[in-house]
Image (spheres, coloured by chain):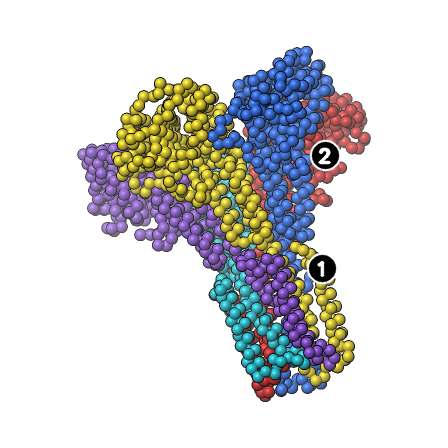
Chain colours: A yellow, B blue, C red, D cyan, E purple
Amino acid sequence: LRVRPLHELRSHAPGEPAGIDHLANIDSAPPPGEVMVEMFDYDADHFEARTAGDLEDLEQFLFEDRFKSAKVRWIDVLGLHPYVVNRLRLRHGFHTLAAEDVLHVPQRPRVEVYDGHLFVVTHFLSIGERGLQAEQLSIFLFEDTVLSFQEFNRSSLAPLRARLEVAGTKLRKGGAGFLVYVMLDMVVDHCFPLLERFHDVLDDLEDEVMDSPKPAVLQKIQDVKRDLAAVRRVVWPTRDLLDQLIRGEHKNIGKSARVYLRDVQGHAVHLVDTIETLRELAGNLTDLYMSVNSNRMNETMKVLTIIASLFIPITFLAGVYGMNFEHMPELDDRWAYPSFWVVCLLVSAGLLTFFYRRGWLGGDG
Amino acid sequence: LRVRPLHELRSHAPGEPAGIDHLANIDSAPPPGEVMVEMFDYDADHFEARTAGDLEDLEQFLFEDRFKSAKVRWIDVLGLHPYVVNRLRLRHGFHTLAAEDVLHVPQRPRVEVYDGHLFVVTHFLSIGERGLQAEQLSIFLFEDTVLSFQEFNRSSLAPLRARLEVAGTKLRKGGAGFLVYVMLDMVVDHCFPLLERFHDVLDDLEDEVMDSPKPAVLQKIQDVKRDLAAVRRVVWPTRDLLDQLIRGEHKNIGKSARVYLRDVQGHAVHLVDTIETLRELAGNLTDLYMSVNSNRMNETMKVLTIIASLFIPITFLAGVYGMNFEHMPELDDRWAYPSFWVVCLLVSAGLLTFFYRRGWLGGDG
Amino acid sequence: LRVRPLHELRSHAPGEPAGIDHLANIDSAPPPGEVMVEMFDYDADHFEARTAGDLEDLEQFLFEDRFKSAKVRWIDVLGLHPYVVNRLRLRHGFHTLAAEDVLHVPQRPRVEVYDGHLFVVTHFLSIGERGLQAEQLSIFLFEDTVLSFQEFNRSSLAPLRARLEVAGTKLRKGGAGFLVYVMLDMVVDHCFPLLERFHDVLDDLEDEVMDSPKPAVLQKIQDVKRDLAAVRRVVWPTRDLLDQLIRGEHKNIGKSARVYLRDVQGHAVHLVDTIETLRELAGNLTDLYMSVNSNRMNETMKVLTIIASLFIPITFLAGVYGMNFEHMPELDDRWAYPSFWVVCLLVSAGLLTFFYRRGWLGGDG
Amino acid sequence: LRVRPLHELRSHAPGEPAGIDHLANIDSAPPPGEVMVEMFDYDADHFEARTAGDLEDLEQFLFEDRFKSAKVRWIDVLGLHPYVVNRLRLRHGFHTLAAEDVLHVPQRPRVEVYDGHLFVVTHFLSIGERGLQAEQLSIFLFEDTVLSFQEFNRSSLAPLRARLEVAGTKLRKGGAGFLVYVMLDMVVDHCFPLLERFHDVLDDLEDEVMDSPKPAVLQKIQDVKRDLAAVRRVVWPTRDLLDQLIRGEHKNIGKSARVYLRDVQGHAVHLVDTIETLRELAGNLTDLYMSVNSNRMNETMKVLTIIASLFIPITFLAGVYGMNFEHMPELDDRWAYPSFWVVCLLVSAGLLTFFYRRGWLGGDG
Amino acid sequence: LRVRPLHELRSHAPGEPAGIDHLANIDSAPPPGEVMVEMFDYDADHFEARTAGDLEDLEQFLFEDRFKSAKVRWIDVLGLHPYVVNRLRLRHGFHTLAAEDVLHVPQRPRVEVYDGHLFVVTHFLSIGERGLQAEQLSIFLFEDTVLSFQEFNRSSLAPLRARLEVAGTKLRKGGAGFLVYVMLDMVVDHCFPLLERFHDVLDDLEDEVMDSPKPAVLQKIQDVKRDLAAVRRVVWPTRDLLDQLIRGEHKNIGKSARVYLRDVQGHAVHLVDTIETLRELAGNLTDLYMSVNSNRMNETMKVLTIIASLFIPITFLAGVYGMNFEHMPELDDRWAYPSFWVVCLLVSAGLLTFFYRRGWLGGDG
């Protein structure tokens, strides 16, 4: 299983033809275990789940009859391999460029309209072991068939499979468009805990900045900014994607499914708002850092100034009476030494008063 | 009663179905006192207010005849509970997604158009004990019926209930659309004292920054910025919501009510302008902070430099004549010691002149 | 007469009904001298100016015949009082919300279209004793009648009254729409000297920053920024207002008046450009401030470093030969003392060379 | 000849009527030499240039027959005087507001559409002795006549006059619209060397900042920013102006001329891009300044810290053995004095090692 | 071969006529080797490549019959010379302004629509020896003919020539529009490795900033910013160009080619997103720089303060007992000297405790 940082760019090499026809391993099936193809036939009353056993003869599997003529068929592919994508392409007739976008992850979230079907690209965001990670979910929506391609994480869509098994739900009654809605709803809802997490991280960083403003903290802030920029690059186009699905009069998405998509879009707008706020908070932290640091330097300077200023004048005085001139009348005076101490105390008291008036002797200001 | 910070996000858990049908306590009425349902029937001449006694049999209450066939019915719900929302949904036939948005607070302010009714989400903003707080007000507007849902604060709409009791007012003569206008007017007018408060806080913070630029002050500025960002997230969409109500030709909102809504929208635009100005002022305070701080550091440095520079050269001189060399002709000179003091004074005077010319001896610059 | 800072917000209290019907003093005329109502009837050949003597019987005055059936009537009200506004409202039939906006100053500049008349809100900006001040000018434009309401400053429209007395001018020949154009032209032209003034203030502040960067200067810069934000909040909507008047096909504004309004709008666009430039200049001043300050600190540091570095090593040397060890061969050497001075001079020369090479001994860098 | 800084604002005084009818010297011709009126009649085959000799009888000159019925007439006015502008206005019938805009320079670049003619305002930008200067070029485009008004610089359009004399060129074959295109092309092309110049200035300033970051450098950067803002205020509207000319279906501008204008607009868009990049570079220079300055301060601090830290401990030691206590066993020790030096060297070596490890002894970091 | 920095501006001199007719060397062929003209005739089954031998008689070459009436002809010109461009212009009839834009590189990327053909300007970006460089690729698309002009780098389009030789590919089957798509695809795909490179450079710079924040690093950051601004100035208009090609219903670009162009545009949008993110990262590095620098200064200050504060008080004490007063009782005390050391240790311990409590003795904070 691969984990990719979000900033990675993916396209075919310059000059290479687009599409998947020329790919090397397009005619050889993947080793067992690398790709998993599941097929769900369902309507309000019927439900059957099948798993493709023999990937080398995938085509036959794909042409199997629907279970009791169930209304909707969902083919769920986990793992990306040119052979599998190409078999599905030949069976369902989607465009070679769309097939390429399924394989060359990550692509920008978007919806593309073809004759008879829609192609939707989107991303599941999550926090993995090596930081923020995204997994592309590519969806083809035909009139009563849905194809979905995921990279590695079977658990992302697990709740959907579980809900499908329950008869009589809106999901079972709804058509293919409703199934796609549920997937997009899950994609968007996945982002909320992520942003809560960012919120907590920023709160912690604010405390760290106030306590000890070291460059390491700033670097963490930079990392958060970078991650937020990455999340934003996924969420903004997802919002637009939903907008297109709602406004475009695609016949594959019924009117009632559109009401539900509007709900998802509301959440996506909320996400966008929240990301912008988080970015602002992260930006403010940099200001806070600089200011706490500058305050600390001021503190250091004050300590140095107070100590140096207190002792420099009286050290001079001590130096004077350590001189070896023949004729220094004060040296012989009986009260000279006590007087010296009195002068020292007076000078120090004067300076302390001066500093006190400036407010330098307060605790932290 | 719950108090929520504004940044909280709310959506159903990923994978869970949307809508309220699957909620746990949808079939059991809330304990007495947790939810309050009031019903107002009125037109220009008639007025009656009723309170639902028995929440377990809410449906019967909702089907009661209107008082003397009064034109408008307003059902005012305080406290959010799935059972109550669902009863009202069954009675008045609004969408399960709208019902979910009533319960899953906070939602983004917006208006949604359904066949036969409008669904409006907005927020009352106020300063509570634990800082800025928002309370969602969800409104359903049917042809001659208004449903409103509030979370906890009965006083927000109290003036409206009082005005309803007075016969012959425009409010009593107006239809359901006019009632919704009055609610939205109150929502917007609630923000004005809030922004005045922010203005005062920023003025106080400016004084604090000028007096003693401590990190704590900057943290307060950050808090204000955060609160302003939160208020903005509520007010901007409210402005758009009003725009939609005015431009969309919804038959539930008459032409005369639209004139009044235009007035509310004018206030909302004013709010948006003011928030932007406040944000700018808060941003400027950070600059002011950094500059005051840098001035203070400069001051500290000058004090240190002046004191150190005055005494370091003459301390050296005193050190010279404290040396124990055999052959130091000055030591025996009768006028050496007084000359030493003269030299010290001359050096100090020279340095003071130097500092004075640089303007370092002025009061605060 | 009231003078208001621009940031003040004004709306009715939350929950209070909109409109003016419920205002306390709507039925009692204001004391003499508080409000002044003038009436001008004119066309190309005729002109008459009348002043309402008895405010308590204002209605009769307003129903007086036009002087020789003059084409245009202009009613000019100075001072805002519910009684007067309401009398005019009853006579000319404008909306109660518009009447409220006349009284509840300041309102956002805008134009509102009613059946048969336009309602225009705008502001005269000027520099008063207590800083920037704005006075609302509210205008109702009927087919051949103009009502204008001002708060206190009779001199703002004085040139217009003077120009009206001259027969045969374009103003006298033009209709009611042309009169409104002249008012708006004056409103916009009033801003030019204001912005010139801001320009001069920023130039002065730049000099102050270069001479002595004290926090007080920065506070002045903040004040300018705040004032500019306020001016912007008035000028931007005025530009939009003019745009609406030109594009909207209002029959009260003839085609030729529209050409003139286009000219005013050109000036308003120029104002907007200039305000943006001024805001940028003010923002740059903050940068300049920080940089001058940081340069000054650098200077201070250099003085301290040079003086301290020059004397610290040789003070140590003097300390060494002030030690009381029994066996210090140098002490008895005849040339030891002169050698000591030579060493001091060499050390100092070396350090001065070092500083000179770093460019620290130059005048100001 | 006047030279104006770009930020100057120009409008009539508040309250004064718009247009030029009321101007003082509208009926008296300017003294000879102040205004120059030239007239060019041309088509593909014919060409004649005439200069108005007697400005007091300008009208007669303007009514002269075209040279051999040449297709296009261009009247080129250098110097702005109400009398001359008014004569031309009476002859060609343009609007009094346009006439005012010709005289009240500078106006915002724009195009205004009147019945039968277009009015175009634009500016020649150049670097004069007193910095950046702009000269307004006002153009009236009739069906086969072009009027152009310039302020003082006859050389700006000199290449155009020269090209007109060559028979058979596209310019001579083209109509009045093509002539206007050539003028606008020259206006835009004039900006390219200007921006190259800004580019060089910014490069020089970057070197200055790296060498010696004094406030004077920052002030120069501010000046560049200010100039760039001024250039932008001219170029942005010029781009829009060209857009309007191309899109608006003005019959005075033929389809082929529109192709050429599209080319000019391409250059204007390029200018806008370049200005934005230059503004960004100027903004970055401020950051560079602050950072170089802060580095220098760091350097100063390090020198002070190293020298002070090296000598302060050993100076203390020397002070200890300069004490006059009776009982100090070390004083009598034979190896005490050499040991003292050894200790001094060890302490210094230790501190130098400490500084070296921190990287403070490197050349510049 | 020329290499140009991206910021260079190019237009004809002010006043010079547009187009190429007046260029000096338009009638003399370039010396051999300077320009290379290749001609490719192909369709699904046929393919022939020819090279123009004799540039002086280019016209004849251009009029040669197509190889076996092949569907598409591509004329590929390497090297820009007025003579060659003009010959092609005469043969294929494109506009003189377009010809000028082919010669006067660099032009802004854009598409221009002429009757019967499209003119597309775009740039190959690459990192050359002297930094970022761009090479203009100008394309004319006729119904079944494509002309392309490049400046110097034959390898940019080499993969395309190689792919053309393979029979039966989509490229060979596609028409002229498909050929242009492949070129634009290569242009966009060329940018991906470039941006990866920028990403690496920024990562390295971040490390450098954390290690040693010298002005040289900041200058490198500025360079990256400058380069990014340049890349952006190329990529943004390329995205718009693709949008225009897709939306505009140009008959030279078939429906299937448009699907492919949509794919390219998706990549271009991805590039734009990435550039914005990189700009943000570069901007953040400046903040990081300032903060690391300010931390370092704080460190320096702390070292100075600690060392100075430790020794200044006890040096004073040593000075006191070095005084030569007659009457100093402590001097004769037997335990005075050890007591002195004890006091010194106590004072130092006190100060160290003070510093420790402030957290100044930690490693790096």
Mark 2 residue crowding within 10 angstroms, few (<14) / some (14–19) / many (20+): many
Label 1 sits on what residue type?
Tyr
Q: Quadrant of residue B10?
A: top right
* Picture coordinates of residue C99, whole percent (x, y): 69, 27
Q: Residue at x 63, y 45 (%)?
A: B220
Give whichever of A247, E256 is nearer the camera: A247
Relative placement, left or right, of D78 versus C24 is left
Q: How many marks?
A: 2
- The tag on residue D250 is none
Figure quadrant of residue B253: top right
Which of the chains bears the disc numbered 2?
A: C
Work out whether residue E164 or residue E311 is closer to the camera in this orientation and state it: E311
Q: Residue furthest front?
A: E335
Mark 2, secondary structure of its residue: loop
Residue at the spot x=26%, y=35% of the render? A28
Disc 1 and disc 2: Cα gap in Å?
52 Å
Q: Secondary structure at mark 1?
A: helix
Query: Which chain is home to disc 1?
Result: A
* Mark linked to residue A356: 1
For residue C264, say whether it is visible.
no
What is the x, y in percent for residue E136?
A: 35, 45
Q: Is residue E54 above or below residue C28?
A: below
Q: Residue type at mark 2: give it.
A: Glu
Which residue sits at x=77%, y=80%?
A333
What residue would you read off at disc 2? C151
E100 sits to left or right of A200: left
Q: Residue furthest left?
A: E68
Q: In the image, residue A332 lies at what x, y percent? A: 75, 81
